[in-house]
Image (tube, rainbow, N blue to C red):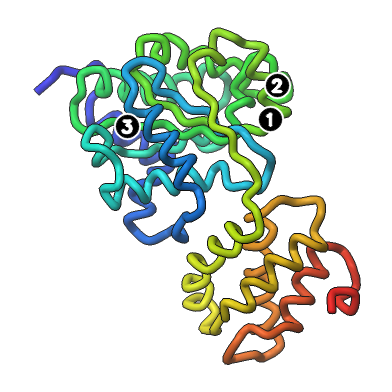
Amino acid sequence: MPKFTISDEELNGLISRYTRDITEQDRLGKFDPISGRDRELDQLTLILLQRLRKNALLVGPAGVGKTALFIGLAQWINQNKVPKMLQGARLIELEMSMIGAGSQNRADLEGRLIPIIKGVAERNSMRSGPPIIFCIDEIHQLMVAFKASSYGGIADLLKPYLTVGDLFVVGATTREEYEDYMRTEPAIDRRFQKIEMNVPDAPTTYGILLRMKSKFEEHYSLKISDRACDRIVKLAERFIRNRNNPDKSIISLDQACAYAIKKGIVDELDDESISVAIAAEAGVNPKAIG
């Protein structure tokens, strides 16, 4: 057995207290199935298989499903849809608010984070079991240039391990925040390969809703027809202009089901409930929806 400076007991304790194990949560059925992102998941898999620069940066507008790709990767891993090198991998989300909760100062925060990073890096380096992959949403907040964040500069703690390829990191940010904060730190930026997350078109979004609707049917005990999903996508595209798919269609579906249950519908999601949900998200009168 290899000798680690951070013991298994200490590392697992830190991970359970301060991070979220996405692969484990998926095994417990916490997430809806992710679909429509096979191209991006293929790109992500290819990056993670590489020896040195095995870090990916998901770049795209809000609401397109950047963080959903974390879940999609966990589902591919749990379904053995990844090459042997990544089978059994563990996806750990580094959520800085969890790591920083209750800390009195920067030293406390780093005292929690550094052992997690070091413990994971040394296991990946020695190939002690399947890889452990960090997922970081809003990764730009860890850059020195992001003055509004109390976590600014934390990315420097990752840098030595990124350089030698001992960490797998998947980060997510918007194009604007990437340009403003990550490109200004080339030592970090060049260690990531970018994956562009485009807004899915209406047919792709419709397919995503079809894959997800069974979870909503189970939750609400309400039938959702394929026609209802198609109607939601088309109306969301037409009326909700300030948000992106698939997020706006998924939220509209959820709200429509809730409204139907509230007014006593017990069989199938109806058109009126969909109209009301779309109108609420778009900020218009439901009569304008039709």
Label 2: which secondary element? helix
How far apart are the alpha carbons under marks 1 and 3? 27 Å
Q: Which one is closest to the eye, mark 1 or mark 3?
A: 1
> Which residue has dot 3 on it?
132
- Of all residues, the one furthest to the left in this rendering is 1
Percent across and percent down for residue 3 are 15, 17
Quadrant placement of the N terminus: top left
Label 1: which secondary element? helix
Q: Earlier in the sequence, mark 1 or mark 3?
A: 3
| Mark 1: amino acid | Arg
The part of the image, by quadrant, that contains residue 205 is bottom right
- Please report the residue visible at 37 percent of the width from the left and 21 percent of the height from the top: 167
**Residue 34 seen in the current view:** yes
Residue 135: give its label: none
- Please report the residue visible at 61 percent of the width from the left and 61 percent of the height from the top: 203
184 to the left or right of 172: right
Q: Are marks 1 and 2 in contact (CB under 8 Å)?
A: yes
> Which residue has dot 2 on it?
179
How far apart are the alpha carbons under marks 2 and 3? 28 Å
